Amino acid sequence: MTLGSNQHPERGPLDGDRLEAAFALTPGATLELLPEAPSTNEVAADRARAGAPEGLVVVADHQAAGRGRLDRTWQTPPGTAVTFSLVLRPTVPPASWPWLPLLVGHNVTKALVALGHDAKVKWPNDVLLGDDRKVAGILVERVETPDGPAAIIGVGINVTMTTDELPVETATSLAIAGPGTPDRTRVLVEVVNAIREGYDVWQAGGDLGTCRLATSYRSHCATLGREVRVDLPGGGQLTGTAVDIDPDGRLVVETASGTERVGAGDVVHVRATG
């Protein structure tokens, strides 16, 4: 594998041979590895509309114009992040689809914990390390295709970025948080496998699978029990204590004027309770 500069030897390209070998062991998984792409979600959506089956993983060694929730854009220095999109074709009832973004965030968190990181998930699916610093963002989009609706799962993880390279001061990277020097190829494989495993269990479990996902998600959600401010998509804010995740995946917030259920919004952790 070709390495990067002497200053950052860990910033070589992703190891295509290792990725091919790893995903060959996952039934139904296929890999499209691109040197660079503006947005892996856009590429994956085009592939889904053209008939790509469930399990296609579109990986950009460098993503030049990533998209996040609430139409945010971001870019990372080459060789410092894991950016990919996964094509899924859920067969669960439409009422269960809102759980998909939470499932992805939950399983990205589990993969990073398995790699030795102190990760947790902020509702709905931001992945945090340490003192609430964001290490990964997730965007799940529904795309209509001739073969039925598809879900495009976009994930971006800060891997080897230095403090000076972080997009905002509230972010972090796996390298900054430690332990050790992260391997982008390994991070990619472990995260994709965790998402697929969690997704397959959820799909097969029916209503019970969603109940189990909800229980597991609650136990790993850093938002519950916190004082929060929620910036709502249509404007306005609400503040209160995050007390639960309801059966539809919405955040339940106790405010001064009563209980509110939030289906979408940008959550800010204000302080811990107690």
Image (cartoon, grey):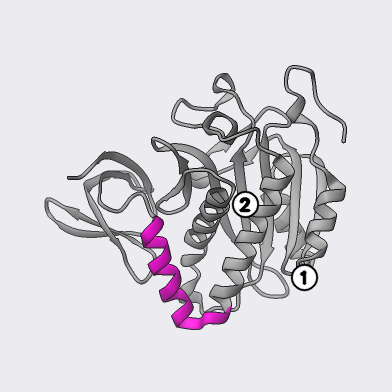
The residue located at (63%, 53%) in the rendering is: 191
**Quarter location, residue 150:** bottom right
Relative to 75, residue 88 above or below: below
- Mark 2 or mark 1: which comes first in sequence? 1
Q: Residues within 10 Å of mark 2 (few under 14, many from 20)?
A: many
Can residue 212 be found in the magenta stretch? yes
Which residues lie in the magenta part? 204-220
The total number of labels drawn is 2
Relative to 74, residue 209 above or below: below
Element class at badge 2 = strand
Foreground of the two, 266 or 185: 185
Q: In the shown orientation, is residue 230 left or right of residue 29?
A: left
Q: In the shown orientation, is residue 114 left or right of residue 133?
A: right
The residue located at (49%, 27%) in the rendering is: 168
Mark yes or no: residue 27 visible.
yes
Q: Quadrant of the C terminus?
A: top left
Mark yes or no: residue 151 visible.
no
**Residue to which mark 1 is pinned:** 28
Q: In the shown orientation, is residue 103 left or right of residue 256?
A: right
Can residue 61 be found in the magenta stretch? no
Q: In the shown orientation, is residue 267 left or right of residue 90?
A: left
**Residue to which mark 2 is pinned:** 154
Foreground of the two, 181 or 269: 181
Q: Percent position (x, y) of residue 87?
A: 69, 62
